[in-house]
Image (cartoon, rainbow, N blue to C red):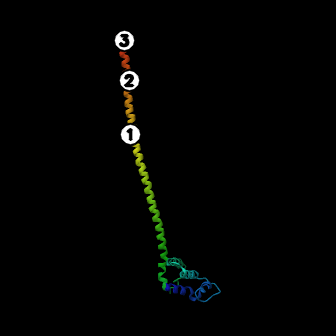
Amino acid sequence: MWQMLICLHRRCYVRGKRSHVTACLYGGKKKKKIEKARGGEFASLFYFFFLFSFSRLVVKFLYSFIRVTGCTGASGNCFFYFFNFFYFFYFFYFFYFFIFFIFFIFFILFIFFIFFIFFIFFIFFIFFIFLLIVLFFYIFFFIFFFYIFLNFLIFYFFYFFIFFIFFNFLFFLFF
């Protein structure tokens, strides 16, 4: 922690190349002319938030953003330069973790949703197939037996009446 603060202090006030707004926060020469700085304002803001932050995690996230501006370790003589990549990728690991977590939740929900839809569809499909088979057999047997029964009745009565009339005719003819 103190190495980081010393590093930020050395980087942000080296050769007086930082603005007077940030230079007056923690000592240093106050300049009236604001010169172009390579991330000095962001570094001082980080320096301010580092002391008054509520969580070290927030600090690491801020540091990961500030590292992009080249505030710390750009001159090459900074102790904390080696850890810039660690803090920079720390945020992205956390970010990727959230992406993976959200993706994982949505993936699990999607799988369960697909499984649920497939399960419902499968149940209705089996029920529908069963219903079709039952209806097919009902219709088939109804038509089949009804056809046979009607055939039987029609032809039975048809022949019965034919022979009845014929035998009556013969009866009246010969007797």
Report which quarter residue 130 is drawn in.
top left
Q: Is residue 41 left or right of residue 154?
A: right
Residue wearing tag 1:
137
Report which quarter residue 21 is drawn in.
bottom right
Mark 2: amino acid: Phe
Residue sitting farthest toward the right: 32
* Residue 148 spot, x, y in % from top left: 37, 31
Does dot 2 land on a helix, a strand or a loop?
helix
Q: Which label number is shown at residue 172?
A: 3
Does dot 3 land on a helix, a strand or a loop?
helix
Using a 10 Å C-alpha cutoff, classify the residue at mark 3 as few (fewer than 14 neighbours), some (14 to 19) or many (20 or more).
few
For image coordinates 37% across by 16% down, the residue present is 166
Residue sitting farthest toward the left: 174
For image coordinates 43% across by 54% down, the residue present is 118
Residue wearing tag 2:
157
* Residue 167 spot, x, y in % from top left: 35, 16
Counting residues from the start of the chain, the first of labels 1 and 3 encountered is 1
